[in-house]
Image (cartoon, grey):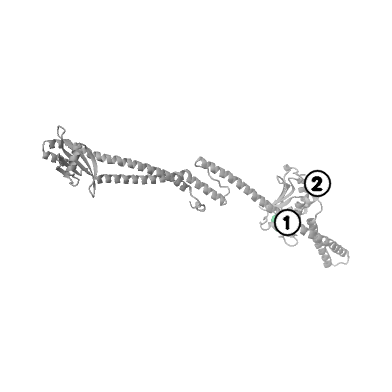
Amino acid sequence: MPRLRRYRGYSLRLAVTAFILLPCMLLAGFAAWLGLAAVERQGATRMQEDIELVTRAMTLPLSHALANRELAGVESVLLSAGRIGLVYGVYVYDEQGRRIASTGTPRAAMPSDQVVQLATGRERGGDFEDLGDEEVYSYFQPLTDAGGRIIGLLQVTRRGSDFEDYLSELRAWTVAGAVLLGLLLTGVIFLGHHRAVGRHVSRMERAMDRVAGGDLDHRIGTSGPLELRALSGSINRMLDGVVSTHRELVQRRAAEITLKEQLAQSEKLAAVGQLAAGVAHELGTPLATVDASAQRGLRHDALDDPLRRAFERIRGEVARMEHIVRQLMDFARRNPLRRRPEHANRLVQCALSQLAPDLERSDTVIETPGESDGDGPALDVDRIRVEQALVNLVRNAMQATPRGRVRISWFDDDEGRGFIVEDDGPGIPESVRPHLFEPFYTTKTVGEGTGLGLSVVHAIAEAHGGRISVDESPLGGARFRLLLNTSGHRA
Ligand code: ADP
């Protein structure tokens, strides 16, 4: 799990090893050690018992042969005893301790005095003896005649290494078994840990990484043991809380930025408006003078044609300049609004009647709300100025789509009330939108547009405490939304 490397401390796996696996292994090792000691003891006893049994089996025929002085009988019993694999040496002594017959290794034979001592002691039993380079185990059995008189001693010997071999084999098997058990236990505990806890914890970790990587809607799946499910559920609830707070913050920040931009725009427009008002005011009088002079000139009877055309052109251009001055004055107008409740439909109809000459010349189809929509909501507005805003918006839309469709509608929603003017023209590129409401911004040729229409609409929306915004229309072109009465301000 490379992700864990960034933390200091021990892993869950190490904890399981140290707190569960290691104590279990130590306990198992201790139990194996105790068991082995018991088995060792039992094994050694059994090996001694084996020799004891062999000795007992030989006692009767040997006693009989010895009592009858039949040496051949003694030899034959020894011969058959020598064939038994576990017997290392067999020795038969007479009552004086002399060895009268033996088979197997002669090394373990006893000196006569000891034999007499053992035989007269009438005790049978076994003992280990060190022969220098090896150890042997001997079992002694006194031999008696029918009357119970001691007539000799039988000694049966087994190699000490038999015991050693047996014990080291036993130990080797025990150690191998313990190692195998340890490995199996480790495997089982690691696998068990992975299935019960590890994989669920890794899944939780991966899920948290995804959330941290930006996938805010991703959540931890709730599976696995109850405790981990409860933990995943708590983390998910915490993530829900964190994410919703984060989203709220982002929204609030975006709203703040928009508000700041609007404020900056308003301040800019106010400054330009002041300038425009001054210019318009100063131009009004000279323009009126020029127009009056041209009018007087035209009244002369002896006016030749070129001069008449010149005076008429002067008047035409003066009219155009006056139109611009009027727009400038509209834009710069800061006098208080004369608000009155007006139905949306009436405002639309009045604006359309002002546009009658344009409509006559144009092939654009104007769509307005049907009769079923009634008069529409009542708006508390300055009628003259709202009509002017609608005229400007509809005129722009008509110019954008000379043979297309322009739709005028009203809205009454959570935000407030106002109008929507949209068309199926080319629309407005995203890059242009920030400049749209700036005075004198136009894409039209000289004489066709002044770049003041939307600035005037902006000023009117602001004066009403509303807003003008633009986006894409479902018709395919631009959609202007003119908010006039915010929800706190209703007619
Ligand atoms: P003008 O119409 O005199 O150019 P405006 O302020 O009314 O000035 O409009 C500014 C610019 O916005 C226009 O030149 C035009 O490029 C663009 N515009 C306005 N309305 C639309 C519309 N409905 N579709 C496409 N472009 C528009």
Residue that appears at 54% across and 45% down: 220
22 horizontally vs 279: left or right: left
45 horizontally vs 29: left or right: left
In depth, the one of 56 and 10 nearer the eye is: 56
In depth, the one of 306 and 313 nearer the eye is: 313
Q: Position of residue 316 (x, y in %)?
A: 81, 62
Regarding mark 2 in the picture, which secondary structure is present there? Answer: strand
Q: Are marks 1 and 2 in contact (CB under 8 Å)?
A: no
Q: Looking at the rendered structure, which numbered label has been put on residue 265?
A: 1
Q: Position of residue 157 (x, y in %)?
A: 21, 43
Badge 1 density bin: few <14, some 14–19, many ≥20, Cα 10 Å: some
Label 1 amino acid?
A: Gln
In depth, the one of 4 and 347 nearer the eye is: 4
Ligand 1 is located in which of the four quadrants?
bottom right
Q: Position of residue 460 (x, y in %)?
A: 77, 52
Regarding mark 1 in the picture, which secondary structure is present there? Answer: helix
Distance between mark 1 and mark 2 Cα atoms = 28 Å
Tally of marks: 2
106 horizontally vs 315: left or right: left
Label 2 amino acid?
A: Arg
Q: Position of residue 344 (x, y in %)?
A: 76, 46
Badge 2 density bin: few <14, some 14–19, many ≥20, Cα 10 Å: few
Report which residue position mark 2 lands on. Answer: 340
* Residue 478 visible in this rendered orientation of the protein: no
198 horizontally vs 252: left or right: left
* Residue 488 visible in this rendered orientation of the protein: yes
Image quarter of the C terminus: top right
Q: Is mark 1 within 8 Å of ligand 1?
A: no
